Image (spheres, coloured by chain):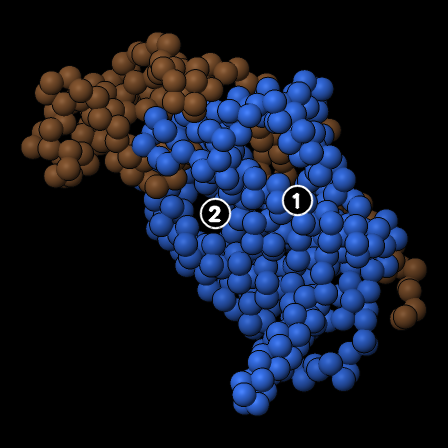
Amino acid sequence: MEPITPTRRTMRVAVTVGVLAALIAPVAIDRDSFPLSTYPMYSRARSSESTIFTAQGIAADGARRTLTPTLIGGSDDPLIVVGELRAAVAADRGDERCAAIAERVAQRPALDDVVTIEIVSERHDTVDRTLGNDSLLERSTRAECAVER
Amino acid sequence: MNRIIDAEAPATRLAALRVAVGVFTLVYLLGRSPVFLALADRPPADFDGVGVLRWFDAPIGSSLLTAIVTATIIGGACSIVGWRYRVTSVVFAVGMLLLTTFRGSWGQLLHFENLMVLQLLVLAASPAADAWSLDARRTQHDEATQPAESVRYGWPIAVVGLVTIVTYVIAGIAKLRYGGIDWLGGDTIQNHIAYSAARLDLIGGTPPLLAEFVVRRGWALGAFAAGAVVIELAAPVVLIGHRSRNAWVAAAWLMHIGILLTMSVGFPSPLFGVAFAPFFALERVVPWAAAQWRAIIRQRAAS
């Protein structure tokens, strides 16, 4: 074991305490940030009823077609896509996002029957949805646009 | 606290941690670089800077973003091989900090990259290239001239481990603080699992593999909820000894597997074991693996 130099040990104590303080600071001031965080993931109470934003394709006969994260948000990460969609609607850019989705859908032969895109917020009983039961409580259309081909 | 401040380890253990964390992070960055670069296409009005970017009114421009991604990749590769480590490790760590902070600056904080970035920042401030590196070869540092174990190498490893431990404890505290004792009842976690599944289903994604299975058995979720909180709050037990360390790491890893299968939410650093790497003598992995390989070769030669 190498000899411990008091000054260096004091420095290590100070730095370690500093690191600890930095990690705990968000908890003390109750403020989440990055990379120092309160790590509140899934900690808050959640009702079984939730409103979820999504975009759907509407066929000429009125049938609704589920799209994909890549079509809706240009990304394969569903969390990012949902967040961006919600932010776009909140910032009153739903029409702009709708048009972007419609442009992507127009390039998909498998979705040739889709004539309209709707950005909607749907309120579901998510437990029923997960169990495969009827779950839709309310639907609200936030933006609508035609698919140009 | 003395176990952390006076921790001793060989230079090769810190070097092995440098390589493990560096390789994982670089591969992660390479895989996610299209996502980082695509941030330049986000509407500037949506930018809401957090962390080190909270003083910025406008997002990082496309050219600068590309430069940061490129510099971070180069810095990462150089720090892994331990070339000009004092500079390249800082480039790597600061680059990852900027990129991940930028990703979380659009109104939605993500929590699966924190540990990775914090580990890099600690390693960048440590002598992690004193062994197993081009720098060591250039300055003719070798294992013969280094002390067998030193607090110079053990303490940084212990601090990286402290970051992991405190992160989990904070996550456990958050559940009780924000969710209250009711969080342990299982209803909250059931609703979170159901919400994740429903959201994925409605956005056209693939619902989590075990979401329906566990939601259908909600009566068991109280035990899972309590288990998760116990695992998180018990993180400091890794400092007690090898058995408690192994048990806790296994439990934490399984918890993350459970989160992945029920919510399709992956925390890459723990899932790939990198979050737990500072708790183990990583420098023994290479000789052990080499010995196993030689044994296999001998066995094949004999048969």
Q: Residues within 10 Å of mark 2 (few under 14, many from 20)?
A: many
Which residue appears at 78% of the width and 67% of the height? Answer: B9
**Quick one: SS at disc 2?**
helix
Which chain identifier belongs to the blue chain?
A: B
Against B25, residue B258 (above or below) is above
Using the image, name the chain to which the residue with label 1 belongs.
Answer: B
Which residue appears at 78% of the width and 78% of the height? Answer: B146
Where in the figure is residue B253, as x and y percent of width and height?
A: 62, 47
Q: Which residue is mark 1?
A: B252
Q: Is residue B190 left or right of residue A8?
A: left
Residue B186 can be seen in this image: yes
Whether labels 2 and 1 share one chain: yes
Looking at numbered disc 2 in the image, what kind of residue is underneath it?
Leu
Q: Which mark is residue B99?
A: 2
The quadrant the C terminus of chain B occupies is bottom right
**Viewer-side label of 2, 1:** 1
Looking at numbered disc 1 in the image, what kind of residue is underneath it?
Ala
Which residue appears at 67% of the width and 49% of the height? Answer: B250
Chain A: its colour in the image is brown
Q: Is residue B64 left or right of residue B164?
A: left
Using the image, name the chain to which the residue with label 2 belongs.
Answer: B
**Quick one: SS at disc 1?**
helix
Q: Is residue A66 left or right of residue B46?
A: left
Q: Residues within 10 Å of mark 1 (few under 14, many from 20)?
A: many
The part of the image, by quadrant, that contains residue B180 is: top right
Q: Of B83 and A65, which appears nearest the observer?
A: A65
Which residue appears at 59% of the width and 87% of the height? Answer: B298
